[in-house]
């Protein structure tokens, strides 16, 4: 009897172990940088070469599996995965394929990062034209959301793309450019991985230059005129960045701006062109941490930010290093809270009136924990079907601290939808790589070509082989 019980116990233990192993390893849980949508996917496949990627698509067509594409996963609304799908990790697919410094062209696999490109081209005195303000992201991911950055003399990333190869949902590979398979060009760039796998991309480059920082304080009401007269019309200014206060004592009133002006003596570039690496971030991390939990912490953080920027006035920095901004101090881990991004685009002429309306809205939302607003300029760019810059715009990037519970997510949704309404009322739009807070009506108003986008998706991928949360949330 005892032996029988002993055997039964171990059979039960073995069965439970097998079940637990299957639960943990067969259907892995994934999440993105927003930490609001953890889900179980069918499997994670590694992009270990072009043949492997082609086989993944072919196998999916045979089995009926859905596919999603992931890079660094800094999109925050499930754009890189979907429950039950096979998620393809593109990070191993990261080779530099071809570099033509004399033509200022580079071809890279889509899992390569901007850092990979910078390290390759910096010794040749070359730099990227358009990328995010950080260099940690994959090229394929950046194309999929059609990024923009600090450069005010180029438009969005789509404007710097010469061509790319696309592994389509049917398993075939095509070259896409403005002259070949051109109908796919404006859909795949800014297409959130819904039209297939971008295999490799050829980008145009520019010269690495030495810039001198010019930083000054401004009242928000003077910003539009300042930008138009002293930045846009001054051809020596190549890059631009601004911040507006979210601190209680100066909420949405004080600003400081930093212009990156081409230095008169470019021979000094040799003293500044070593690529900078991450520095100690304990102090800014401390101040940002204080700002998460109190109004006085926000006031202190704003004063420190502003003072630090003003003290750097007149300093020199290479173009490549301007594009290597540090983000480690923003890393945030909490079991109950997370930090999300929102990005709103507003016409340049509407800025001060828009800020007034946003202030009137947010001063009533005492529990809405807004930590930072960074402002950039985006020139009109309507090549992508899902273009966010219908005219010359200021882009406001908002960092928000919020809870993870369903109730707290719903509270954030209400405020964010109100902010989007204010943005749309001023002729603006919003960026799509974030949590699906916006309503369908807001999406249609911000992106009037969304119906054409979904129609093209159905045409290219009738079996819905590639999918993600964004598509499943809004498809018509």
Image: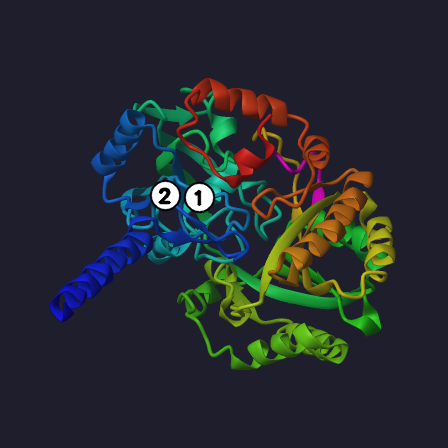
Where 77 sits versus 442, above or below?
below
Where residue 157 sits: x, y (%)? 52, 41
Give the image quarter of residue 179: top left
The residue lying at 34 percent from left, 46 percent from top is: 90
Location of the N terminus by quadrant is bottom left
Residue 110: give x, y in percent of width and height.
36, 42
Q: Secondary structure at mark 1?
A: loop
- Which of the marked residues, 1 or 2, is nearer the chain's N terminus? 1
Name the quadrant containing residue 299: bottom right
Residue at the spot 74% in from the left edge and 46% down from the top edge = 417
Whether residue 341 sits left or right of residue 354 in the image: it is: left
User: Would you say residue 95 is visible in this rendering?
Assistant: yes
Is residue 310 in view from this perspective? no
| Tag shown at residue 81 | 1
Quick check: is 29 in the magenta stretch?
A: no
Query: What residue range appears in magenta?
Result: 387-393
């Amino acid at each position: 009897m005892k032996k029988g019980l002993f055997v039964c116990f171990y059979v039960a233990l073995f069965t439970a172990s097998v079940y637990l192993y299957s639960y943990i390893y067969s259907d892995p849980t994934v999440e993105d940088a927003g930490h609001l949508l953890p889900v179980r996917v069918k499997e994670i496949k590694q992009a270990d070469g072009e043949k492997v990627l082609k086989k993944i698509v072919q196998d999916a067509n045979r089995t009926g599996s859905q596919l999603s594409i992931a890079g660094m996963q800094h999109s925050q609304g499930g754009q890189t995965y979907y429950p039950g799908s096979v998620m393809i990790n593109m990070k191993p697919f990261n080779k530099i394929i071809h570099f033509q410094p004399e033509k200022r062209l580079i071809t890279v696999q889509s899992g390569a990062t901007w850092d990979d490109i910078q390290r390759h081209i910096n010794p040749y005195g070359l730099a990227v034209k358009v990328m995010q303000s950080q260099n940690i992201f994959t090229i394929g991911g950046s194309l999929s959301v059609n990024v923009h950055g600090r450069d005010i003399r180029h438009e969005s990333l789509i404007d710097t793309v010469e061509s790319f190869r696309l592994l389509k949902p049917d398993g075939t590979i095509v070259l896409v450019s403005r002259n070949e398979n051109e109908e796919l060009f404006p859909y795949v760039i800014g297409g959130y991985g819904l039209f297939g796998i971008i295999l490799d991309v050829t980008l145009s480059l520019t010269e690495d230059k030495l810039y001198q920082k010019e930083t000054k304080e401004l009242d928000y009401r003077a910003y539009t005129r300042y930008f138009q007269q002293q930045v846009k019309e001054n051809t020596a200014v190549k890059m631009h960045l601004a911040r507006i206060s979210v601190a209680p004592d100066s909420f949405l009133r004080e600003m400081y701006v930093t212009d990156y002006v081409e230095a008169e003596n470019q021979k000094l570039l040799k003293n500044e062109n070593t690529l900078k690496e991450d520095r100690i971030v304990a102090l800014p991390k401390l101040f940002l941490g204080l700002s998460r939990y109190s109004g006085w912490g926000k006031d202190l953080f704003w004063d420190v930010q502003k003072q630090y920027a003003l003290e750097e006035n007149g300093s020199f920095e290479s173009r490549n290093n301007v594009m290597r901004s540090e983000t480690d101090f923003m890393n945030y881990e909490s079991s109950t809270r997370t930090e999300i991004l929102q990005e709103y685009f507003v016409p340049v002429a509407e800025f001060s009136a828009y800020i007034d309306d946003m202030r009137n809205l947010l001063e009533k939302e005492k529990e809405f924990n807004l930590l930072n607003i960074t402002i950039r300029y985006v020139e009109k760019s309507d090549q992508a079907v899902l273009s966010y810059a219908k005219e010359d715009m200021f882009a406001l990037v908002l960092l928000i601290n919020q809870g993870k519970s369903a109730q707290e997510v719903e509270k954030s949704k209400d405020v964010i939808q109100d902010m989007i309404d204010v943005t749309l009322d001023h002729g603006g739009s919003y960026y799509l790589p974030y949590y699906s807070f916006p309503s369908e009506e807001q999406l249609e108003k911000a992106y009037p070509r969304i119906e054409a986008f979904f129609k093209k998706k159905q045409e290219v991928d009738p079996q819905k082989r590639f999918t993600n949360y964004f598509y499943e949330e809004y498809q018509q």
